[in-house]
Image: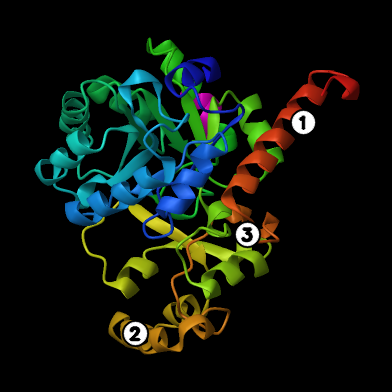
Amino acid sequence: MAALLKTSYPWIKLPLIVSAPMLNAATPALAASVSQAGGIGFLAGGTKPAELDNLLTKTTALFGAKSQHRRGSNQVLPIGVGFQNWGCDLDAMSPIFRKHCVAAIWLFAPKQLSDFSSWAREIRSASGGRTQVWIQVGTVLEALEVMRLARPDVLVVQGTDAGGHGLRQSASIISLLPETIDALKAAGYPNVPVLAAGGIVEARGVAAAHTLGAAGVVMGTRFLAADEAGIARGWQNEIIRVGDGGTSTKRSTLCDRLKETIGWPEHYDGRAITNKGHLDEDSGLSDAESVRLYKEELKNGDEAWGDHGRMVTYAGTGVGLIKVRKPAAQIVQETSNGALEILRRGAGVPDSKL
């Protein structure tokens, strides 16, 4: 399956590293740096076509008209765009698909799975088949239904260790990924590349995902600590500071309630670093008071992060493995090369052959 990805995205290096389409955090500089380093960088599509148009225009300029990273004679922009489908208007976004032909569009969190069908159909029509459709799932049943409805070119399988939004009820990638791959084969879908997401932040996780059958991996939390990430320094400092991700992060809907984000399907929540906001919720503080305190603390800038703070700090359970801020390209190269070395050694290839 990795070879199939290489055919579709000839600039990539294997093992493939993908940066997640994190809203605001995934800047044009981050997406471009990841792709230029041999991965696939993603922007978040958001809900406003004019803002996405601006982001894509900036990203295009970072590659240049004759960039070697563009895919063949079709001049496809070698990045992707991700959408949280529950909050997006397909008709409003369709002109953007036509104006900016990106390599992939990643779909996630629809109001109902059947929405993927119309999105996939329009993406393929608008791009003349040049833009591939990626769909994120979190259960085996969801993966099978999505294949039946939309026939995505790539499936992103997200385990419960992921930071940010995901299904409230799911499995860790270590069991979810191989079960999903087996189910796809049994259902007659043996050739769809499956990417692993959730808790993967460094080379050992990438190598493990490949051993489980992944064609590549998606990392979100790791790229929050990239130089190009568009987040507050206080948030980045927390990503580097926090350890023991299984206990220092928590899945809940608190972050959406604090930010007054309305509309997420009820079977989704988000994983974030626990802080004063979570502790106050556990002690019975009302939503109204939590929101008031959160808005007050926004005025404190980078000082509003930490155990004492209330800022929304999305992160996956792999956060404890992140020790330093680095350029995105260095993250891609070190992680991919490190995973390749682990896989070769596991296969018995002598060090001299690495």
Which of the two labelled residues, at mark 3 and mark 1, occupies the earlier sequence position?
A: 3
Quick check: 145 above or below 272? above
* Secondary structure found at label 1: helix
For the C terminus, give its image quadrant.
top right
Instruction: Please say whether residue 274 is visible from this viewpoint.
Output: no
Whole-percent x, y for residue 189 in the image: 39, 13
Check disc 2 and report the residue beneath it.
Answer: 295
Query: What segment carries the magenta color?
Result: 176-180
- Tell me the mark number nearer the camera, choosing from 3 and 1: 1
Q: Residue at x 35, y 19 (%)?
A: 73
Using the image as rendered, state which of residue 263 and residue 266 is in the foreground. Answer: 263
Instruction: Please say whether residue 216 is visible from this viewpoint.
Output: yes
Quick check: 84 above or below 313? above
Quick check: 102 above or below 62? above
Check disc 3 and report the residue beneath it.
Answer: 245
Residue 342: which numbered mark, if any? Answer: 1
